Image (spheres, helix red, strand yellow):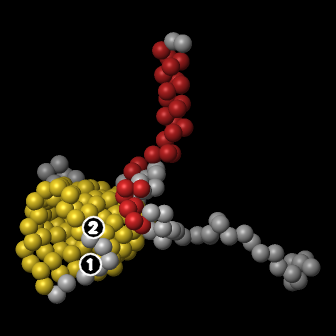
Amino acid sequence: MNALAKLAVVGGLLAVSAPNFAQKATPEQMGPYANREDMGVFHMQTKLGSFKMINGEGRVDFSFKGTLLVSNHTDGEMRVVSGNLRKEYSKNNRTVYTGQARVILTGKWRGIQWFGSDLTAVKYGKGFVRVSGEFDRNMKTGFYWFEDPAAKNAFPASSVISLAIPPPEYGANRNIKPTPRKGGAAGGN
């Protein structure tokens, strides 16, 4: 087989497998919430920005530099996987941390709020998230996406956007079969 034919075969295989890159969350990302139908996956990546997750439940795995506020966290744990995170304040079910770390948080919460730099985050769960980006030295604000990394959206600069997780699906439910009706002017029995 000549080089051109091999290249055509490899190109065809890549084209066929491209839709498989838009995958659901991995079992590690889902944690104890695996395969819950009311939850979805959400990714964020920015050099400079902030987010607030509101009324959430699930598993959040993120690495960052900056300040983190966790409020009313229940039914789970917060684990520092790597780095150095220092507790600055803890009162009224609110705890503030500063530093650079990779954190995995599971459970329910009223709010998880972060601002700083070098964020990479994956959330598998439900709730709302507000994101805001700032321009870095390369004039980029960062990105967020749901399941498909090819469908990245830019963090808004100088504004805030609120997103539901999982994202709402508008339109007809394709899993419902129509129920035949009897009688009527349309010629039913």
- On the question of residue 145 being in view, the answer is no
Circle 1 Cα neighbour tier, 10 Å, few/some/many (<14 / 14–19 / ≥20)? many
Q: Which residue is mark 2?
A: 105
**Residue at the spot x=52%, y=32% of the render?**
13
Q: Looking at numbered disc 2 in the image, what kind of residue is underneath it?
A: Leu
**Residue at the spot x=49%, y=34% of the render?**
14
Q: Which mark is residue 56?
A: none
Along the line of sight, the residue nearer the viewer: 14 or 78:
78
Task: Look at the numbered discs 1 and 2 and tell me whether their residues touch, using CB distance below 8 Å.
Answer: yes
Q: Quadrant of residue 122?
A: bottom left
Circle 2 Cα neighbour tier, 10 Å, few/some/many (<14 / 14–19 / ≥20)? many
- The correct choice, above or below, for 168 with respect to 185 in the image is above
Tell me which label, 1 or 2, sits earlier in the chain: 1
Circle 1 SS class: loop
Q: Position of residue 134 (x, y in %)?
A: 18, 61
Q: Position of residue 53 (x, y in %)?
A: 29, 73
Along the line of sight, the residue nearer the viewer: 74 or 96:
74
Q: Looking at numbered disc 1 in the image, what kind of residue is underneath it?
A: His
**Residue at the spot x=62%, y=69% of the render?**
173
Q: Residue furthest top?
A: 2
